[in-house]
Image (spheres, rainbow, N blue to C red):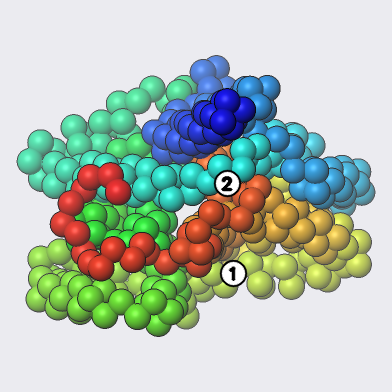
Amino acid sequence: MLEVAPAGAAARLAARSGFAVCALTLVSAVFLQKIALPGTGGLYPLNLFVFPAVTIAAFLAGVLEINTTALVWYALFVSLGALSTALSPSPHVSALSLGFFVVAQFPLVFRNASSEDFQRRMMSFLSTVGCVCALIGVLQFVGQFVVGPDVAFFLDKHLPENVTVAGYNSLIPLYWSSPVYKSNGVFFLEPSFFCQFLAVALVAELVLGSTALRLVILTAGLLCSYSGTGLTMLALFLPFYFLRHGHSRLFVFAALLGLVLIMFGDALSLDAFTRRISEFSDVQSSGWARFLSMFRVLQEVVFANDLTFFLGRGPGTVQEQFRLLSFYAFDPTWGKVIYEYGLLGALAYVRFFYVAFCRGPRGLRFALGYTYLFLGGYLLNPSILMQLAALVVWLGKTAPATDQAREGAPEETGHMFVPALGTR
């Protein structure tokens, strides 16, 4: 007994340390994503420094360990990237872009060193952070009618340019020339980032065993973002979740929510969502660009040449011809990998991503994997990569402790909805 107690205490300490590192990383990913490193002109996010710094500190403290298999595939991909850079026919190739990849993705070769499982605690924390962000987003959206957008969007309007991450459109009107802005949750780079994070938090809440109050708060935040990207993930996730777990009360909740939205659709300007469905057939629309344009870009540029087919056009080149195209184009993560690193690089990255990513919680694996690969050009975005690490990659050393966590099922509490926001 004298030997067991210290071992148990050490295990609990390791689990608490692992949770603390993941929680800190998630909080930084959310609340620091607009902040740039001073003196870089907004080109380098602060999280590009925070992410590897936290990773190295956690590794030295014994909280994280190296995933050897992931490290091998990461090294192979970087080597192929260097070869692609050397042989690139593009004048836009950038060794700096490859260096950016090396720094931003290196933390994904680590995993939790403890065998203690804190997945459910981490998902509960994600749900809580999501609810807090949703409330902030709702207040921001409503606040622009009360105190004006200058105050409601104070970070976007008053944060100095030299400490603001450049290249993002944080102020987006509901429609062309509208005086009303979509909510970006104050701290998020764009309304789409806000929407996607809340959608992932909603998935975590469902996996844990959803409470009515949290679902309402997260849904309200999603509506105030007036962004459809996170909703596409939910549209794929929810039917399978409902069918698998048979939660009839959630069907009732969804039906009541749909009825409310239909009745008050005009007052809520929900046509900002619905009219975007037609975008998938319009080559000049953002919907077509985000989900379909990359297929044509790859066919016309990369697949037309044997060298670029196998090794790509080189790091940093994905947008080189966007201005010359007759259609509106976008570079999602999956497309950027194939365009810049070719078939060989894409195969190496897929294997690296699978080894690093696919041992984490199943529900979050789908939500974050879909978001990362399809909803944005996130290959070099440290804030999104920090979410992947904190919520999936760093939790993936061992199988979850319970079958419920493995399957993404809620706890058998006997009650589907518990109207409380407290800890579980």
Residue 104 visible here: no
Q: Nearer the viewer, mark 1 or mark 2?
A: 2
Side of 144 where 281 appears, left or right: right
Report x, y in % for residue 124. 37, 48
- Residue at 42 percent across and 25 percent down: it is 161
Residue nearer the viewer, 24 or 317? 24
Side of 91 where 256 appears, left or right: left
Query: What label sits on residue 293 in the rendered view?
Result: 1
Side of 369 where 212 appears, left or right: left
Q: Earlier in the sequence, mark 1 or mark 2?
A: 1
Give, as a three-letter code, the residue at label 1. Ser
Side of 85 where 181 appears, left or right: left
Q: Residue 311, located in which quarter of the rendered image? A: bottom right
Label 1 crowd (10 A; few <14 / some 14-19 / many >=20): many
- Location of residue 36 with respect to 338 vertically, above or below: above
- Residue at 33 percent across and 42 percent down: it is 129
Give, as a three-letter code, the residue at label 2. Leu
Residue nearer the viewer, 210 or 172? 210
Residue for badge 2: 395
- Residue at 74 percent across and 43 percent down: it is 67
